Image (tube, rainbow, N blue to C red):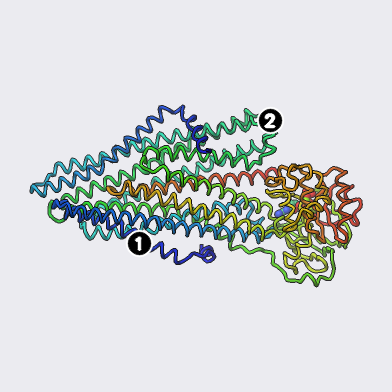
Amino acid sequence: MKNIRIFKRLLGYLKAYRLRLVLVLLAAVISTAFMVLAPFLVGKVTTTLFAGIADGVFYWETILWLLAALVALYFVSQLFSFLQGFGMAKITADVMQTIRREIDEKMHRLKLNYYDVHTHGDILSVITNDVDTINNTISQNLTAVVTQVTMAAGVMKASEKYYGEQQELLGKLNGYVEEMYNGQTVVQTFHYQERAKKEFARLNDALKTSSRKAETTAGAVSPITTRLCWNIPGVLRSRFLLLQEWQEALARQRQQEIVFSAFWMQKRRFRTASGV
Amino acid sequence: MKMIFSKVKLKPKQISGLFLLVLFSAVGQMLLPSFLAQMISHGVAESKNSVIWMYAAIMAGITVLSCIISFLSVKIASYISTDFAAQLRELVFSRVQEFSAAEMDQFGTASLITRSTSDITNVQNFLTLLLRVGLLAPMMAAAGLVFSAATGGQVSSVLLVAIPVLLITLTIIMIFASRYSIRLRKKLDQINRLFLESLEGVRVIRAFNKQKAESARFEEANGDYAMTAMAAGRITSLLMPVISVIFGVTTAAVLGMGAYYVNTGAMEVGSLVANSQYISMVLTSVMMLSLVIMMFPTSYACAKRISEVLETESSIRDGSFPLEKRPAHATVEFRHVTFAYPRAEEPILKDVSFVSNPGEITAIIGGTGRGKSSILKLIPRLYDPMFGEVLIDGVNAKEYRMEDLRSFIGYVPQKNVLFSGDIAENLNFGKENGTEEDWKQAAKIACADEFICKKKQGYHEAVAQGGTNLSGGQRQRMAIARAVMKKPEIYVFDDSFSALDMKTDRQLRQNLKESIGEATVIMVAQRISTILDADRILVVDDGQII
Ligand SMILES: Nc1ncnc2c1ncn2[C@@H]1O[C@H](COP(=O)(O)OP(=O)(O)OP(=O)(O)O)[C@@H](O)[C@H]1O
Ligand SMILES: [Mg+2]
């Protein structure tokens, strides 16, 4: 539900970049199409070699041409792949800027009593969550949709569900840590430590189970599907997907880290500044 | 690092199981090209369909098997890494729970939160990466090299050029990317700061009608960030294409060299095809491994920060004095107490002495920042004095077990921290499994019953984090009720009546007087009316009682 809402909003933002987006998608398609041709050329080289052995002559020229074509293929395909990333970077940055501006403006427009019932943490976490989801959707899914058409949609869905659940539990756990650390004086003087540890263990366990599920579905099923779909002609392809997986993990982590640390740091700084 | 691994128990069975699976997986990956070579040499070259089908079936079998193996190994790896993270989180959290106020000050709450949350997540992600890639990649690289050298002869020398080119390119791009990511992070901090400032100051901004100016300030930082983000995105989008091209050129070179050797008869077509795959495997493994290595420094820094927490012992030691042997009850005595906060140069309290006996009220007054709260913090032993002693019921506070000491002290801190949950849960801080009866009694004494009864859900009304959905006065009364739940012998109130109106203040003190019996009360107060009925008034100035 939430994702559909966000996706709709996202489409609204992307409207302004229709032409650019079409160009980016075109670049992606061209890049993929050229890439798909590579195994054919490699096959041609071997057939030529066989033909040469059978005929007793060596077709030097054909082979050199084929190899040159192969190199050219790679260059063209990767040039378009780069253009795609290049164009996408601009769109992503622009859309994110618009979203942040809208949030800021909205903050100045909201009725004041909204601030009575929502803590700053609440407001910030709603915002960062939404912005994060949108950012992920743009920068990963959109390009992935084009380049990995074969990826089974169901798998993505399942792992996304677990991933969302895991994020939520992580948020809860971190919130609990924050609360207990900030209230350390009360926790200690009321000898609440043991009870806090118990509650923490409960949250921690739930998180463990959920992230296990998320990791096994996302991490295990996707290599399988990709391997089955792509592997037979080119080992190369699956290696790339592994790299992609790694990149995604890195991006995810960096995002988490940035959002959290900036958030805590600001909160902290503000507290000291306002003397609360 | 050592610290972490000595405390977190990893299951050796899981690790050796994973190692075996990864080994199988590497062998499987290596066998595929060899069978392909055989298929080409014995099947395609001699046009024997039955042989082709046989090899195809074998290869399909290996692929299915390697899928199963990879599924299992991801599963085991995720078990290991999630288990590791869970244990580590629990260790760190428990350790921090034991920290005294001094250690909390030393690290700072915000830093401790980061260490317990995102630092651990970071280390966990690295471990996952290490288990999934760090194990497989070296095996693949080694096996690929051996296979390629054994079957391809000269062809594998392509790697002598390809590997350095790959590594240099990776390093250059990574250097640029990380430079951008540092800048990006700084700019994001800037945006967050501006945003949070606006959020916290939203009322003031409205009152002065400064929305436009604030938005303009934000937009400037916003545009700045977008520019940097775009540049960073463009640099990173260079990574994959460049690597792909290196791979492509390498493949072409292998095929070209191979064609030459096929011509001279030194090599078969099948093993040429196999070799181009071995070589790309070696390259991939080298690349993956170097990426893991590049991530190591950040994760190592996180691990070190976590170890620092685990290595820190609470500076306050538990005593063992049995509660039954206390010579007195409900008395607090300060004997020539001098106290400085850890790492502060000047003592905050100098030679403070006083006694508060059962049934007595001791009031402490004095200007702001003179050390009133600091006196109170020594009673539940949040800190220890530098010189002199704090005697509780006639025994030095250090002699008690911390749990015992705090069980008969009802401390209401100056900053009333409430926790998210409901009213009842907050009251139960004072008494685990308190009943409705207990809540009502405590709330009545603290004059909190009237506002709790007005809430729709009564005692199960939700409390927001920090108690922000309650008024300042309501929060104070909640904090008092929470302490009353304990039925302590020693009440310690730090400016706990300041947010109450005169009438409630008087009523509350009246209720306390009636209900506490022989307990002793030590309170910091601002209003003269609050301390009128005190048995003793201490005036604190510059850390001394005058
Ligand atoms: N955790 C701490 N670490 C270092 N210094 C501290 C700490 N807490 C308080 N201080 C310092 O100790 C001094 C006395 O603080 P204290 O809180 O005891 O004052 P106070 O009399 O209670 O003031 P107020 O009336 O404003 O509550 C202040 O100068 C303060 O800066
Ligand atoms: Mg004070």
1 and 2 marks in contact (CB < 8 Å) = no
Q: Does residue A91 appear to the left or right of A147 in the view shown?
A: right
- For badge 2, the amino acid type reads Arg
Q: Secondary structure at mark 2?
A: helix
Label 2 is found on which chain of the structure?
Answer: B
Specify which label sits upstream in the sequence, 1 or 2.
1
State whether residue B208 is above or below residue B494: above
Read off the residue under disc 1. Answer: B23
Whether residue B546 is visible: no
Q: Does residue A95 appear to the left or right of A40 in the view shown?
A: right
Q: Does residue B64 appear to the left or right of B344 in the view shown?
A: left
Foreground of the two, B21 or B1: B21
Tell us which disc is closer to us: 1 or 2.
1
Residue A49 position within the rendered picture, expressed as x and y whole percent measured from the top left: 15, 47
Read off the residue under disc 2. Answer: B206
Foreground of the two, B524 or B386: B524
Q: Secondary structure at mark 1?
A: helix
- For badge 1, the amino acid type reads Leu
Residue B15 position within the rendered picture, expressed as x and y whole percent measured from the top left: 43, 64
Residue B422 position within the rendered picture, expressed as x and y whole percent measured from the top left: 70, 48
Q: Does residue A197 appear to the left or right of B511 in the view shown?
A: left
Label 1 is found on which chain of the structure?
Answer: B
Residue B155 position within the rendered picture, expressed as x and y whole percent measured from the top left: 22, 54
Q: Quadrant of residue B386?
A: bottom right
- Quadrant placement of the C terminus of chain B: bottom right
Foreground of the two, B251 or B226: B251
Foreground of the two, B321 or B66: B66
State whether residue B99 is above or below residue A49: below
